[in-house]
Structures are given as structure tokens and as C-alpha cells.
Amino acid sequence: MLQSMSALLDVKRDNRETYIIAFDRINEEADSVLYQYYEMAIKHGVTIENKLDNPTVEQNTYFNNVVAPEFQVSVSFLETKLAKWLSLSHKQSSVLAQAMYSVFMDLRNAGKNDSSLRNTYIKFMCWLYYRFKSVLTKINTINTPKIMYEGNITSYELYMLHVLHRSGCD
């Protein structure tokens, strides 16, 4: 476990391997690693304490005005919308679109309908823009972005972290 935690603290990695580590109890060693990771997340990522707020009415309105309210579960649709909304490179929007598509397919296979997927898409797009935009430009670079979440996590927050992880964030 210590080896995994050491790799987690390495911002510049040659491989594209990313890590997810969750702690349900803290000891002295874990506390030290968490503190170091927190410092790295401040410099090279995002820290979230307690929860991700749902998008506001104003954020939803702005999103709909810029991107348009249409929605499709397809990689090409997501790539186009992500590139427009977040000003990412083609490679970055492609990686992120694949990750989002994968999560949407998991949700669809779990019984979520298109309306639910559309609401999730809007929530994700707002979270990406308002909370994670600073790390998205580091996707697929030598500097692995760090995300630290502290608190009780909801299922949709976990799905969002899964998208970020599949995109190349620790």
C-alpha cells in the first residue's frame, strides 16, 4: 500500500497510470500521505470539502445558452460539446468524452432513462466548467492532476470523480 501512496504523490509520471485511494480510517502514516496529497491537490488540482454543489439556475442557463440544451449519448457529440464548452484540445476533449460516455453507458445499463442521463450530462458539464476546468487542461500531460475529496460522497459525485479518473486524474 505504501508503494501505491508514494506513486500517488508523484506529480510527474511517465506512465499514464492513475490512482484512486480511499481511506475509511486514518493512522499516522495515512495522515502524513493525506497531508502531502492535499498540498499537491492545491498546487496541481482541486480540493473538495464536503460536497460538490448542484449547478445553480444561472449556471444551467449559461450552459444552455453557450452549448444548447440538446443531448445525445455518443462520443462524437460529447467531444464536440466538451471542446466548445471547455476550450480543450482535441486530445483532451476526446479522452474526457470517452470517459463520460463510459459512465453514461454504465448508468444506462443500470436502468437510467435518457432524461436522467441528460440531467447528469448538464450537472457534469457545469461541474467540469465551474469546479474542474483548471485541471482539465492538464489531462494527458506529464503533470498528473490531483483531486482530493473529503466528506460523504453522493453517487453522482462519485460518477464525476470516475470520469476524471478515467480521463487521467488521481
Image: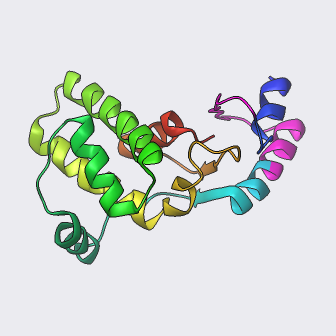
Q: Is residue 75 visible?
A: yes
Say which quadrant the N terminus sits in.
Answer: top right
Q: Residue furthest bottom?
A: 58
- In this picture, is 75 found above or below 50? above
At a point 19% along the width and 51% down the height, the residue shown is: 119
Q: Position of residue 123 (x, y in %)?
A: 29, 55
At a point 64% along the width and 45% down the height, the residue shown is: 141
Q: Position of residue 55 (x, y in %)?
A: 31, 66
Q: Main secondary structure of the magenta part?
A: loop
Q: Residue furthest front?
A: 90
Q: Is residue 54 visible?
A: no
At a point 33% along the width and 53% down the height, the residue shown is: 82
Q: Can residue 35 be found in the magenta stretch?
A: yes
Q: Can residue 55 be found in the magenta stretch?
A: no
Q: How is the image coloured?
A: rainbow
Say which quadrant the C terminus sits in.
Answer: top right
Instruction: Please name whichever residue, 169 or 155, is drawn nearer the observer in this view of the structure.
Output: 169
Q: Position of residue 25 (x, y in %)?
A: 72, 35
Instruction: Please name whichever residue, 62 or 98, is drawn nearer the observer in this view of the structure.
Output: 98
Q: Is residue 82 left or right of residue 36?
A: left
Q: Position of residue 68 (x, y in %)?
A: 15, 63
- In this picture, is 105 found above or below 75? above
At a point 44% along the width and 56% down the height, the residue shown is: 88
- In this picture, is 157 found above or below 103? below
Quarter of the image where one finds residue 28? top right
Q: Which residues are magenta?
A: 14-36
